[in-house]
Image: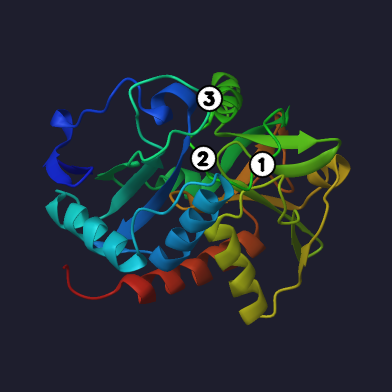
Amino acid sequence: MTAYLNGQFLPLEEARISPLDRGFLFADGAYEVIPVYRRRPFLLDSHLARLQRTLAGIALPNPHTAGEWNELLQRVIADSAFADQALYLQVTRGADGKRDHAFPSAVSPTVFICSTALVAPSAAQREFGVAARRAVDNRWLRCDLKTVSLLANVLLRQQAIDAGCAEAILLRDGLLTEGSSSNVFVVKDGVLATPLRDHRILAGITRDLVLELAAQHRMPCEVRDISDAELRSADELWLTSSTREVLPITSLDGQPVGTGRPGPVARQMYDWYRANREQATSGADV
């Protein structure tokens, strides 16, 4: 498996960084996960635009243009053994030989790219949905930045896993924010709703595509605050992410959501999503 690290393509097991790298010491960096189908990255421009927003938000200059990123990513994609991939890229502020909270001067960022097989939801998860549990959102207040500082998300997700669930659904001050590693949609009486895009949530690339598809197909949709009561009384719940796509939640805190099976609105949206994905990534392998 080939990785890219600071100007070199090399076997992943040979990639090394300094223990003084600020990504290692302070989680001072940004990342993206890009799904790849048939060796074609899906919604790459949107992912690179979000990377730029995160880098700007943490005052870290982008080390590459969009064209340069595309060339690097395509090389890693081509060298992977898998046609469908989860492409990971990370940029940290680099290492200057000392540990100091203040930004270093004249230090090159660390740029890392690797790719693994894309693990999609199973047929059973598609057919029956997944379980989730509610949890208090105790993360920092810049959740709109996709940084590598993910310990709170990791702990929340692990609590869900330990409870036999696929995801933790987060609430802050009685309002839905998102999942520990996903965005969340609610359906009630045929109307789709998702929380506002602000500092409390990460603007998911799949979330944005779902909103576009809803508008394109004239599906009633609202972007607004969603209360805990609305969450618990929803007819349907979904989680969305780049690797899990559009996945129904059919059990919340041990109680069925709606009928306890994936609902018709979720099935329709997934059909639209899949058609969009297939159109965007069709063609011969590159």
- SS for dot 3: loop
Camera-nearest residue between 146 and 243:
146
Q: What residue type is labelled 2?
A: Thr
CA gap between label 1 and label 3 equals: 19 Å
Q: Which residue corresponds to mark 1?
A: 142
Residue 138 vs residue 232: left or right?
A: left
Q: Residue 182 in the image: x percent, y percent? A: 57, 45
Residue under numbered circle 2: 147
Sequence-first disc among 1 and 2 = 1
Which of the two residues, 118 or 128, is positioned nearer the viewer here? 118
In this rendering, the answer to whether 200 lies above or below 198 is above
Q: Position of residue 41 (x, y in %)?
A: 32, 62
Neighbour tally class for label 3: few under 14, some 14-19, many 20 plus, Cα within 10 Å: few
Secondary structure at numbered mark 1: loop
- Residue drawn at the location 35% of the way across and 64% of the way down: 65
The reply, left or right, for residue 229 in relation to residue 252 is: right
Disc 1 crowd rating (10 Å Cα; few below 14, some 14-19, many 20+) is some
In this view, the residue in front, 85 or 23, is: 23
Numbered badge on residue 190: none
Q: Is residue 18 left or right of residue 29?
A: left
- Write down the residue under mark 3: 101
CA separation in Å, label 2 and label 3:
17 Å
Q: Can residue 83 be seen in this view?
A: no
* Residue type indicated by callout 1: Arg
Q: How far separated are the C-alphas under marks 1 and 2?
A: 9 Å
Q: In the figure, residue 78 lies in which quadrant?
A: bottom left
Dot 2 falls on a residue whose secondary structure is: loop
Which amino acid lies under the numbered mark 3 shown in the image of this protein?
Answer: His
